[in-house]
Image (spheres, rainbow, N blue to C red):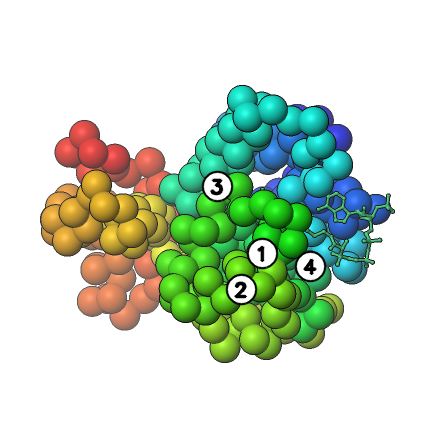
Amino acid sequence: MKFLHIKAQEEDGILTITLNRPKALNALNMLMVNELREALENYHRVWPNTRAIIITGAGDKAFAAGADIKEFEHLDVQRAMELSRNGHTLMQLIENAHIPIIAAVNGYALGGGCELAMACHFRIASENAKFGQPEANLGLIPGFGGTQRLPMLIGKGRALELLLTGEMISAQEAHQMGLVNHVTPTKSLLPFTRSIAKKIMEKGPLAVKYIIRCVNAYYNPNENGMELEISHFAHLLPTAQAREGIRAFLEKRKPNFHALTDDQPTENNT
Ligand code: CAA
C-alpha cells in the first residue's frame, strides 16, 4: 500500500503509523486523513499480523499541529461539512477498532492533532509534547470531535477553559489532567509505547476487543453498557480463548492465545 503523507510499518505484530509531513508539523490535510482511513480500514488484510497500532508523528517537533489551515480558505459550508465529517469518520474508526490504537505524542498535538490523539484508546507523551485546541484563535471550533472527547477525558470545566482560551498545556499538565497516561523522555517514547502494546498483545484478543467495545458503550447514549458487558462476558466465557486463559491459570502456566485468534462467540453480535 503506497502513501504520500503517512508511513506504515509492521514489526512483531505492532503496526506503527507515522504522520509524515514534518515540514508542515504533520498538519492533517485531506489526503492524510484519507490515507489514515485507508490504512485503518485495511490493516488486517495488508499487515495481517497486526495486533496493536501506534500512531506517532515524523520529526522531533510535532505529532500533528492540527488540520491543515491552508486548506480551509475558500471552503463553502458543504465542503467544510465534508471535511469535518471525514475527520469524524476517521476518529470513529480509531475509537471502535478491535485492537488497541495508542497515540505516541512526540511534540505539538494541537487542534485536529489533539483530536486524533484523543480518538486513540490512550495516549503516551514525550516530555516535549504540547496539547491544545487553538481553533478559537482562528475564529473556529474543533471539527474532529474535540468538543466531545476533551470533556470526556478531562472534565467539562477544564475542557471549556482549554477550548475557550485556545492555550496550550505541557505534557506534565496533560498528565495531571488525565489526558495522557504517561510522560516519557523523548528517546524512550516509542520503546515505552511498544512495551505497553506488547503487554496488551499477550491478552486474549477477543477480550481486548470486547473491553474496548464495552468501555466505548459507556460514552454512547444509544447503548446500554451494563447489558453489553453481561452479554459479552457470558458469550466470551465458553470460547476457546477464555477456556485457555482459565486452564492456564489453573495449570500455573502462561496462556497461549495465539493459536486461537479466530475463535468467535457464537452470538451474532461480534
Ligand atoms: N496547518 C497548516 N500548516 C501548518 C499548521 C497547520 N495546522 N501548523 C503549522 N503549519 C506550518 C506553518 O505554516 C509552517 O509552514 P511554512 O514553513 O510553509 O510557513 C510550518 O508548519 C512550521 O510552522 P511554524 O513556522 O508556525 O512553527 P513554529 O515553531 O513557529 O510554531 C506552532 C509552531 C505553534 C504549532 C504553530 O505552527 C501553530 O500555531 N500552528 C497552528 C496550530 C493550530 O492552530 N492548529 C489548529 C488547526 S485548525 C483545526 O485543527 C480544526 C479541526 O479541529 C479540524
Spatial CA distance of label 4 from label 1 is 11 Å
Along the horizontal axis of the image, is 40 left or right of 218?
A: right
- Three-letter amino acid code at the position of disc 4: Tyr
Q: Which residue is mark 4?
A: 108
- Three-letter amino acid code at the position of disc 1: Gln
The answer to whether the residues at label 2 and label 1 have Cβ atoms under 8 Å apart is yes
Q: Residue reaching furthest front?
A: 139
Q: Which residue is mark 3?
A: 91
Horizontal and vertical percent for residue 48? Answer: 51, 34
Spatial CA distance of label 3 from label 1 is 16 Å
Of callouts 4 and 2, the N-terminal one? 4
Q: Which residue is mark 2?
A: 162
Which residue is painted at 41% across and 68% down in the image? 157
The answer to whether the residues at label 4 and label 2 have Cβ atoms under 8 Å apart is no
Closer to us: 77 or 112: 77
Of callouts 3 and 2, the N-terminal one? 3
